[in-house]
Amino acid sequence: MPDNPYALEVRPELPKELTRLEELANNLYFSWDRRARALFHRIDPALWSACSHNPRIFLRRVSQSRLDRLAVDPAFRLHFKEVLDGFDTYLAASPRDSDWSGQDEDDPLIAYFCMEYGLHESLHLYSGGLGILAGDHCKAASDLHMNFVAVGLMYRQGYFFQQLGRDGSQEMHYRHANLVDIPVVPALDDTGQPVRVSVTLPGREVMITVWRLDVGRLNLYLLDTELPGNAVEDRTITHQLYGGDRALRIAQELIIGIGGPRALWAMGIKPAVWHINEGHPAFLILERCRRLVAAGMSFEGSLEAVAAATVFTTHTAVAAGHDLFSHDLVSRYLKSTVDSLGISPQRLLRLGASPQNPDRFNMTALALRGSRFHNGVSTVHRDVAARMEAHIWPDIAPEENPLITIPNGVHVPTFLAREWVNFLDGHYPEWRQKLQIPTFWEQTIQSIPDHRFWSLTRCLKSDMLEELRDRLLQQYTRNHYTRARIDAMRAVFSADNTRPLVIGFARRFATYKRALLVFQDINRLGRLLGDPDRPVIMLFAGKAHPQDAPGQSMIRRIHEFSSRPPFLDRVFLIEGYDMALARKLVTGVDIWLNTPEYPMEASGTSGQKAAINGVINLSVLDGWWAEGYDGENGWAITPHGRDLTPEERDLTEAEELLDLLEHEIIPAYYRKGPGGYSPEWVQRSKRSLFTVLPRFNTERMVMDYFRKLYWPAAQQSRRLLQGDGREAEQLAVWKQEIHQHWDQVSMSWNRPPPASLVTGQRLELTINVELGALSPDDVILECLLETGDTDHHGTAAVIHRMRPMAPAEAHAVHRYQLDVEAPDNGLHQMRFRLYPFHELLSHPFETGRMLWL
């Protein structure tokens, strides 16, 4: 008998009454529409689960007789019609039906580039938070009718599937995707032919084909090098997400960065704004410059024009999260790009220069230098990123440099539990139009009777327990656990066992996320978990990067803890973390635990997903929680890193974590009232939901991107491209003059400022400015007047612009004066800053140059 028999798939034929099931399967709308997913589940629940909720596979495997019966089932036909009506209404709606301000027929076309997209567990195009955020961004853009396309890579294998060995070791498995299992179609060029573009790699041209994936109302284009004409090694460039060595990584980033824009242009798509989500696709800056240089612009002028239309979002506060390539690798792989731009290799390398890694090309540095609109993803993260990247604007204080904050959010329809959706649809059918109205959510959630709210959360918890029981049964059986161990697990994860407090920790296993923090005092933790009167269960899930040995070691350590008293049957490690498991965990646990090392958590959106389902967060005040916590919607661990060693910090924060569990959280959960539940717990759970949902959703997030970044970038690009780029060339020349002559600029007092004034006197100041080859038209001199002490802990500064007086002769010292009414009585601080300014700048401090007096 042969070891590898041939597979034969016998496919059903959809009855004519159900043919539009194919349409639903071919649009990722199903990934966030609960009614559509419920429709597939209703056809065959067991098969739907076995197919990993992939409707394409499901419709090829479902029983013909089952389909035939449903085709004449009135109840199913009614359900089907309701889903189709919603689908058709969604796709047919006009942008004018969207009530958000800023929507206009002339809205700029946004092209969004990211290396990964977490849209649904059936599409293995993501590894973690960055991908989930990108998928949510696309879904919200679709919901808002935004003029938007997205670009990524068509991973044939994607990220790895995780299994845990008997010793807790992470086993990584890759599965080659069959394109018939993925709802993609060939993207067509303006002649109606499949798109083909190429990218030059050392010694050869690599051909790229493009697939179109429909995500509601918008298109995601996926680039693929799996073509017969390519060499074997080139056909595998787009196989794995974050796999291989640095040569493969730079090849992937050239495919998306160089091939992505070429693919869009081949389809006649001409974006007005280009959004780089994390630094991986930043080579698109160079490709767009190449096109402008070919049209006659200088490289420096083209860089100004391209940067004006570019938005860059940085997502990581961890040094390892920034892509670095050796200078030799960049020089070899981008030789043709350098030649076409007409610049030296050294000029290219300066675009990716950073003081932290002087011998490496930094993709984040390239993205920042090639964009004029940049953001971090939480208030804490913005400040961390501003300090990390301060070298881009060397004279500007980090708090004033051009990086802004747009907090991350989550796509509510995707991550809000089915039970909540059904409840809201039944009582408040307009809820989807009120995602950003805090008063609606507070009134709505507070109006739910406590017993009803508690009952709904227990239902979600029961569903989660059943799902985890099935997953752990497979995991334990494969690893040959004893029957007694399996039976004990099944007792814990009985659908009826909703009494214990369940704490969930699920995310990427990286050392800075400190999954082991709660185990710092194992005796105390064991006592808390093992109290028979107040039992507590801890659930851990997540993957470690294939090359992250410390992260994989953390998984083994948790496995060791879970296998010995006092944590046996109290701590569980669940394999195969994906979007499906995440949806169960964030809706079913009681506490969502997050213990990052401050300030390394950029955002942490899993906690947002939990909160919108009424789960209560217990987290270090980092990332989104630093601004989401209000003192009553969860519990917070205060960071203690400033004056302590890392070991002392971990011990201190672990003690605070266990204090909160022992003295506040566990007692609050078990402090039951007459109804058999804790009214105090329900109130905090309600507050978690209604305070987080309207603030941290992707509809709000994407609208912030439009108003603060996309629209300004489109306007700035239009300005600089006037007259075939004349304004961009002018700005580039001016900047070169500024950087060439800035070291000649200095300031001094014409006469010292007064130490005091009497009420009613005027404040008169005169400063001498030596500008060298520059002129007063090139600079601005400002007086910042603050009320407060010498450490500047006072009121916000009142800014007065000082006026230049005409010099007595050419190249003389320029005298700047200020004559204003004296401020109110009290102590005031004066500071003076001089900086370059041009009316075409996107941000007044973008040159990065400034002098203080």
Image (cartoon, grey):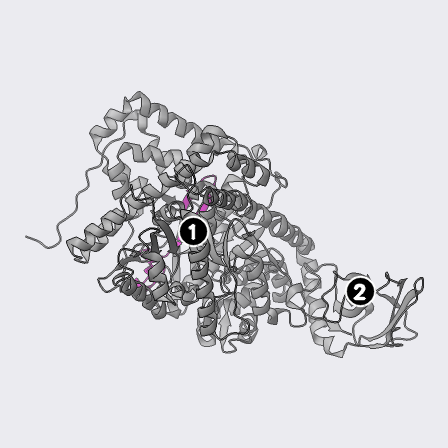
SS class of the residue under badge 2? strand
User: Residue sitting at 30 percent across and 25 percent down?
Assistant: 16
Residue 28 in which image quadrant: top left
Write the residue at 55% across / 33% down.
94
Category of crowding for the residue at label 1, using alpha-carbon neighbours closer than 10 angstroms: few (below 14), some (14–19), many (at least 20): some
In percent of width and height, residue 536 lies at: 35, 53
Instruction: Inspect the image, locate mark 1, and give the three-letter code of the amino acid beneath it.
Output: Pro
- Left or right placement of residue 408 versus residue 178 in this view: right
The residue sitting at the left extreme is: 1
Q: Nearer the viewer, residue 317 or 324?
A: 317
Residue 785 — which label? 2
Q: Which residue is mark 1?
A: 667
Seen in the picture, residue 657 relative to 742 is either above or below; the reply is above
Q: Answer with left or right where residue 346 lies relative to residue 240.
A: right
The amino acid sitting under disc 2 is: Leu
Residue 842 in percent (x, y) is at 68, 58
In this rendering, the answer to whether 156 lies above or below 140 is below
Mark 2 vs mark 1, CA separation in Å: 51 Å
Q: Is residue 282 visible?
A: yes
Above or below, 775 relative to 404 = below
**Residue 473, x across and y down, in percent:** 22, 50
